[in-house]
Amino acid sequence: MTALQRFITASAMTNLADGIAVVAWGWIASLLTRDAFLVALVPVALRLPWFLLALPAGLVTDRVDRRKLILRMDALRGLAFAGAAAALWLALPLTPAPAEGVSNPGLYWSLLVAAFVVGGAEVFRDNAAQTMLPALVPADRLERANGQLWSAELLTNALIGPALGAFLIGVWLPLAFGLNALAYGMAMLLVAGVAGNFRANRAAKSPWRAELAEALTFLRGVPLLRTLAVTTGFWNLFHQMIVIGVVLHGQENLGLSAQAYGLTLAGGAVGGIAGSLMGEGIARRLGPARTMQVMLAASGPCFLAMALAPNAWTLGAAFAAMEFSGFVWNVVSVSTRQRMIPDTLLGRVNSVYRLLAWGMMPLGLILSGVVVSLGEAFLSRGAALVLPFWVAALGSTLAAIAVWRAIRRGFAGLPG
């Protein structure tokens, strides 16, 4: 097995665990409370570290061996999932979820803490992985390598993982978290076998403020990277707005079981895998600028289709279209970033970029709960649950219009 194959397989294992948890976090939270805002706080805890820890993760990534950092963060995530499984086991059987407040405060807070630890370790792990990949393949093969990586991650994270997570929830609730510790252990064995030195080639370490300033100066000097970071941030905000909406909308409006919900999410995985594998070819045919413009413009109609979907099949098809466009965008965006940023700066600039791009996720989750709560004052519960989809559709359409020309100018300004 080559180093790249080990790297991709390890990412697939960790993403299998994350895919199982995609269903488990929101679903188990909904068994403790029916309050949309309190349900949203669990994935908020999972995503908040992207805002709090993105910059420290970049500084650390450029100072240490990136392979060893990945190993440590996978170990931490495995321990957090094992702790969540133990807390859930001790709390069984669960009492019915109240409309306000939570039925088991101790378990609810355990989930919040576990989600925050998992999310924090993911920030460091993912930043290290994105900066390590260019050391494994030539620059002209980055689109292909990223496409292979994301297709493997999506196969496990969004196709196999959610379906398996839904099955495990039906068998025994703690299994949805407990199995993840084993997956992280297997991933660590694979990464440990990747030979090489994965430290940034730097003459000396500077004070952290100077290192961060260097990254900010670089990012400010490249308009295209700024545009892509901000655009991705707003897209992620709108995407996260529908996460809790999908859980509650699926349960209450469409009557989906945990298994049907997991299979609906699997529709998104099919689209995402197709986008990951086809992204390189689409970019070569249309050019990177036009590819990103078209994929961004497709987001609004996809969010709108989710709001109007009458059943699990149509909701899954809308997910597929949304994830297809999103992952074609990612193939071009991340590969462009990996080529443009020097290796000695890659961890830090990547972290600043991802602070802008991923730091908006917690805000999107909070806005989802707020929009539903405010909507219930004027609309029926069912109508209020789809409001986040309408807001996401409008917002992503306006974002596409706002950056259309900036994307074209940014790519036109790149050297030959």
Image (cartoon, rainbow, N blue to C red):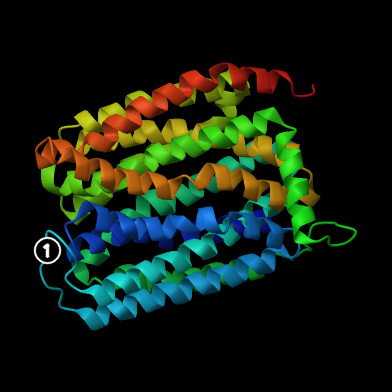
Instruction: Decide if residue 398 is on the left or right side of residue 54.
Output: left
User: Residue 283 sits in which quadrant?
Assistant: top right
- Residue 255 visible? The answer is no
In front: 360, or 135? 360
Q: Determine whether 270 is above or below 309 in the image.
A: below
Where on the picture, by quarter, is residue 242?
A: top left
**Which residue type does callout 1 highlight?**
Pro
Foreground residue, 21 or 190? 21
Q: Could you tell me which residue is drawn at 14 percent across and 41 percent down?
A: 376
The quarter in which the N terminus is drawn is bottom right
Left or right position of 138 against 369: right
| Point 40% across, 70% down: residue | 114
At mark 1, the secondary structure is loop
Is 71 located above or below residue 306 in the figure?
below
Where the C terminus falls, by quadrant? top right
| Crowd around label 1: few <14 · some 14–19 · many ≥20 (10 Å) | some
Number of numbered markers = 1
Q: Position of residue 56 (x, y in %)?
A: 64, 60
Please say if 159 is above or below 281: below
Q: What residue sits right under mark 1 in the picture? A: 98
* Identity of the residue drawn at 74% across and 65% down: 65
Q: Let me know if residue 113 appears in the view.
A: yes
Q: What x and y, as percent, mark residue 405?
A: 58, 16
Image quadrant assignment for residue 267: top left
Residue 235 lies, in percent from the top left, at 45, 35
Foreground residue, 314 or 232? Answer: 232
Q: In this picture, is 326 found above or below 265? A: above
Q: Position of residue 275 (x, y in %)?
A: 47, 34
Q: Nearer the viewer, residue 401 or 154?
A: 401
| Side of 380 where 131 appears, left or right | right
On the picture, is 219 further left or further right than 156? right
Q: Residue at x 28, y 37 (%)?
A: 388
